[in-house]
């Protein structure tokens, strides 16, 4: 049969994509080789989890560890027996690595994740999925994931709790009526970052130019953050500086907003307004980010979501969904639906028991399973894009003192 040049190229491209994909699919007896990039607090938590999973028979190996500080790198290499690499680009060059775990400060997340996918590697990326300053980052990350077909899991491990999936089905079935409002809070006391007058988190062994690549950590050569002289607090308490983090707004709110977006079947917000400030006396003059922060996120035709965070007092507020027929409260062994008797009459409350709890291990199991099935995991990149859009809008609203509005057609944000 005669074949046109266009048909030949199309078939060749199709065959090449199938061949490429086949190299990415793990068989039942194959092991996933993982590299951990960033070996600080969360990086070590991931290392502990992966070592525990391997001991329990999960087919996974830590092949490499990577960090800009030699002390952390040496400690991680000793714990794992993995190869030690100072530059993440050497990780991406390594063909024995199937997936990367990104546990760096926020401003590095998108760059490493995108380059890892381009290098044919799957990605477990700590939250927040991207840095708060740029909406282009989550856009490009999702576009890269869509094109490369890589597996991306965002490190909101609470998403591996089955209750969000169970509630999503009930909401979709109309159990609580039309969604009106939701709320969630994270209230804490105690130490977070390097507080005023508290230097216990600063390790004097960190010496830029000797055993720590400070310029690489900043990422100023890549346009990730401004070039600055060495300041220990910026390294050891990066979450209190806007250059590297959105503070409690991007450290805590991903854990609150992501499950709510999933449970209610939401996508991009319509409008966001935020407020807060630095109220704790030990933080004044030391922190850039607020220690009290709240956002109201409005979605097209509803609902609105009120998110609250406080560092200084741990008296909490319940996580719940308000509907036209009932209120669903996340409590006990899952959730409870309390009918509005004024609307539906005297009906008994309905208890929903979770069938699977959340943990870092369970979140990793979901990711490792998806490496084999090539499905997208519970806290996938598209969900991360919806959440990062709201967080980007919230921090801009706080800093500019104005509400922010999202244009879904253009996928851009502007002040109202």
Image (cartoon, rainbow, N blue to C red):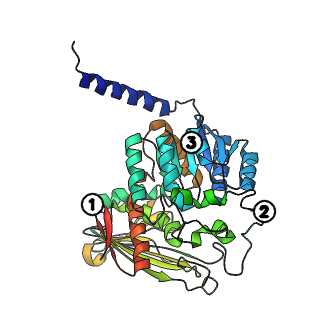
Q: Secondary structure at mark 1?
A: loop
How many numbered markers are drawn?
A: 3
Pick whichever, 377 or 118, lies toward us: 118
Image quarter hosting the N terminus: top left
Image quarter hosting the C terminus: bottom left
Q: Quadrant of residue 22?
A: top left
Contact check, label 3 and label 2, Cβ < 8 Å: no
Looking at marks 3 and 2 on the same chain, the residue that comes earlier in the sequence is marked by 3
Q: Quadrant of residue 40?
A: bottom right
Q: Residue at x 52, y 79 (%)?
A: 290
For disc 2, the neighbor class at 10 Å (few under 14, some 14 to 19, many from 20) is few
Q: Residue at x 52, y 30 (%)?
A: 27
* Label 3 – label 1 distance at C-alpha: 33 Å
Q: Residue at x 54, y 83 (%)?
A: 278
For disc 3, the neighbor class at 10 Å (few under 14, some 14 to 19, many from 20) is many
Q: Secondary structure at mark 2?
A: loop
Q: Quadrant of residue 305?
A: bottom left
Which residue is label 2 attached to?
Answer: 205
Which residue is label 3 attached to?
Answer: 92
The residue sitting at the right extreme is 205
Residue 140 % position (x, y): 40, 52
Q: Residue at x 30, y 58 (%)?
A: 172
Compared to 267, does 301 lie above or below?
Answer: below
Which residue is label 1 attached to?
Answer: 410
Residue 286 visible (yes or no): yes
Looking at marks 3 and 1 on the same chain, the residue that comes earlier in the sequence is marked by 3
Q: Secondary structure at mark 3?
A: helix
Residue 185 % position (x, y): 48, 74
């Amino acid at each position: 049969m005669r074949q046109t040049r266009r048909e030949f190229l199309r078939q060749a491209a199709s065959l090449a994509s199938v061949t490429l994909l086949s190299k990415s699919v793990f068989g039942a007896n194959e092991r996933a080789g993982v590299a951990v990039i960033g070996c600080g607090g969360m990086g070590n938590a991931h290392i502990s989890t992966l070592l525990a999973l391997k001991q329990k028979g999960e087919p996974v190996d830590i092949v490499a560890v990577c960090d800009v500080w030699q002390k952390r790198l040496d400690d991680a290499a000793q714990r794992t027996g993995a190869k030690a690499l100072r530059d993440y680009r050497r990780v991406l060059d390594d063909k024995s690595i199937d997936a990367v775990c990104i546990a760096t400060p926020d401003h590095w997340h998108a760059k490493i994740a995108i380059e890892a996918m381009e290098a044919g590697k799957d990605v477990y990326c700590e939250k927040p999925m991207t840095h708060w300053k740029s909406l282009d980052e989550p856009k490009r990350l999702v576009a890269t994931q869509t094109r490369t077909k890589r597996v991306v899991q965002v490190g909101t491990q609470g998403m591996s709790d089955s209750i969000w999936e169970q509630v999503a089905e009930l909401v979709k079935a109309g159990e609580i009526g039309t969604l009106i409002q939701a709320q969630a809070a994270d209230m804490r006391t105690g130490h977070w970052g390097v507080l005023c007058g508290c230097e216990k988190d600063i390790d004097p062994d960190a010496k830029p130019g000797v055993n720590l690549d400070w310029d690489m950590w900043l990422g100023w050569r890549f346009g990730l953050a401004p070039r600055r002289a060495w300041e220990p607090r910026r390294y050891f308490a990066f979450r209190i500086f806007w250059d590297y983090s959105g503070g409690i707004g991007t450290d805590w709110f991903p854990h609150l907003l992501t499950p709510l977006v999933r449970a209610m079947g939401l996508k991009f917000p319509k409008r966001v307004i935020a407020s807060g400030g630095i109220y704790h006396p030990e933080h004044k003059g030391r922190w850039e980010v607020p220690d009290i922060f709240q956002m109201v996120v409005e979605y097209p035709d509803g609902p609105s979501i009120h998110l609250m965070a406080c560092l200084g007092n741990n008296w909490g507020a319940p996580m719940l969904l308000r509907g036209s027929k009932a209120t669903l409260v996340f409590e006990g062994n899952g959730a409870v639906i309390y009918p509005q008797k004024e609307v539906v009459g005297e009906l008994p409350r309905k208890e929903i028991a979770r069938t699977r709890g959340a943990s870092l291990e369970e979140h990793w199991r979901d990711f490792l399973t998806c490496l084999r099935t090539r499905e997208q995991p519970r806290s996938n990149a598209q969900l991360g894009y919806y959440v990062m859009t709201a967080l980007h809008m919230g921090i801009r609203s706080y800093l500019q003192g104005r509400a922010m509005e999202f244009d879904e057609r253009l996928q851009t944000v502007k002040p109202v």
